[in-house]
Image: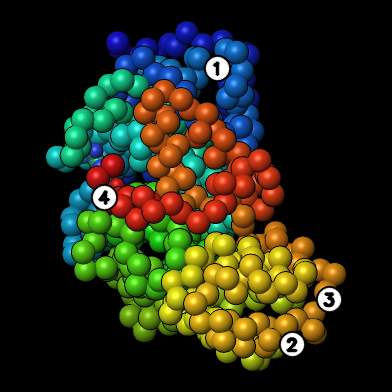
Amino acid sequence: MSITCEPDLNPASLTSNLHWQDGFASLGPDFYTRQLPQPLGQPYWVGRCQAVGDLLGLDAFAPEADALLDALSGNSLLPGSQPLASVYSGHQFGVWAGQLGDGRAILLGETSSGWEIQLKGSGLTPYSRMGDGRAVLRSSIREFLCSEAMHALGIPSTRAFCVTGSEDRVLRESIETAAVVTRVAPSFIRFGHFEHFASTGQLPQLRQLADFVIERYYPGCLETSQPYVALLEQVAQRTARLMAKWQAAGFCHGVMNTDNMSILGLTLDYGPFQFLDGYDPDHICNHSDPHGRYAYKRQPGVAYWNLHCLARALLPLIEDQDLALAALAAFQQAFSDELLATYRAKLGFACEQAKDTDLIDQLLQLLAREHTDYPIFWRSLSHFAADGKAGPLSALFVDQNAINTWLVQYQHRLSVEDSSLVSQSMLRTNPKFVLRNHLGEMAIRQARDHDYSGVQTLLGLLENPFDEHLEHDSLAGLPPDWAASIAISCSS
Ligand code: AMP
Ligand code: MG
């Protein structure tokens, strides 16, 4: 199969709303290499998200969508698309890794409404190093579902339009099949892009990149006397708020290398991520991380470390180390403010009381001692706030005395809230459906048998995770025993 630059599409019916604008490509050839995707053999749909289709003006389920299927598998080009792979560098597991780049991702372009469209797993690029440029079905399904789950939870993330699969074989620990995720974001620029131009001494390009990011995504910085300092401060704050949201949601990213850190503060590059089942601050979700550098409890600290890498890269532009350090200091306050606000929302507190931090700390210590199931605890607490029945909630704990003591304090604290609003707001804050590892795994196993209904069903639940969906109650329960044996590594 060869790639066609004049695809057999009917633009009027399918892609008439898709117009491109010059975005990242306008930076010029020092930032990327033009690269066509590599065709994927006889692709088929694995999952489609119409909400993202709506952002792009694409109908994923249209009868003529097969032309789209080809284009989003790398077998033809969307009209007007000029694909490229970008170059970046980064620190991996705390060690400088040098040049990396889009080794298996290709940017199709940026739509006139400001969405970059990227194919992940679309074949070799000049930055593939030892890799094959491909992504396997399991990791592609996980990225697709989690992108949309995060969005629905109100956690900034890259989005995903679809996964297409193929019988093309890919070698990992065993032979698997290839897939491509079409992902979408305002920008896929990473901390590592800045590190690349700083480390190679390409200072005009470093400045060009910073100016581009400021003009496109942080224009408010131009109104300050030190726009590059303001940029660093803004990125530090956004990253801090993202970390607070991850922690409160029980989300573990797993590979927080600087090349996986978005300059827009988005969750980026889903690999061995996991939503906590039992609450364990020491939890390590990545089997390739034996020392737990990226353990759940370390994520905010690692983000701060990564921001120091970004600061070092921006230093030639900022020219004053003290200013850079002062900008980074914004992280701490932004993180603790956002964390407190998010936990208050989870607890149903609309007003603020000084003692709230004590109540939250006591609760988290109790959850950690007991490894209480994190999603079920919060959902049960939301029901408790409505009906005052402690039974289902205290059944989650061994130390009855401890939970009952905490609940008495909590009820006392709730008495200053508007009781008609508390439970409703908690039920819109604490999801019933969370993309636990075993749910993803069940959908993946079904998809391997060419049944994609599990992917689509899970997507529907995760897009509306606060709704009851009573017919799917079984997907909101405790993980089965076999979930403990799921091992997810960097291999993807
Ligand atoms: P990741 O761990 O997925 O964030 O990837 C780290 C780096 O390795 C990036 O430059 C990726 O593009 C590259 N990479 C990961 N997997 C592959 C692959 N199968 N083929 C080529 N490059 C890859
Ligand atoms: Mg990556």
Q: Which residue is mark 1?
A: 65
Tag 4 and tag 2, C-beta contact below 8 Å: no
Find disc 2 in the rendering and name its residue: 412
Choose mark 4 or mark 3, whichever is in front: 3
Q: Secondary structure at mark 2?
A: helix
Tell me: is circle 1 under 8 Å from ligand 1.
Answer: no
Question: Sequence-wise, which precedes: disc 3 or disc 1?
Answer: 1
Q: Position of residue 96 (x, y in %)?
A: 18, 62
Q: Is mark 4 within 8 Å of ligand 1?
A: yes
Please name the residue shown 31% across and 20% down the image: 167
Q: Amino acid at mark 2?
A: His
275, 324: nearer the viewer: 275
Task: State the SS at label 3.
Answer: loop
Instruction: Tell me if mark 1 has few (under 14), some (14-19) or many (20+) residues whose alpha carbon lies within 10 angstroms of its own.
Output: some
Q: Earlier in the sequence, mark 1 or mark 4?
A: 1
Query: Can you name the residue that lies furthest to the top here?
Result: 8
* Residue, disc 4: 490
Counting other residues with Cα less than 10 Å from the Cα at mark 4, is it few (<14), some (14-19), or many (20 or more)? some
State the residue in front, 4 or 289: 289
- The crowding category of the residue bearing disc 2, from other C-alpha atoms within 10 Å (few below 14, some 14 to 19, many at least 20), is few
Would residue 332 be found to the left or right of residue 427 on screen? Answer: left
The response on whether ligand 2 sits within 8 Å of label 2 is no
Evaluate if marks 1 and 2 touch, with contact meaning CB atoms under 8 Å apart. no
Does label 1 or label 2 sit earlier along the sequence?
Answer: 1
Amino acid type, mark 1: Ala
Question: How far is mark 4 from mark 2, CA to CA?
Answer: 46 Å
Q: Amino acid at mark 3?
A: Asp
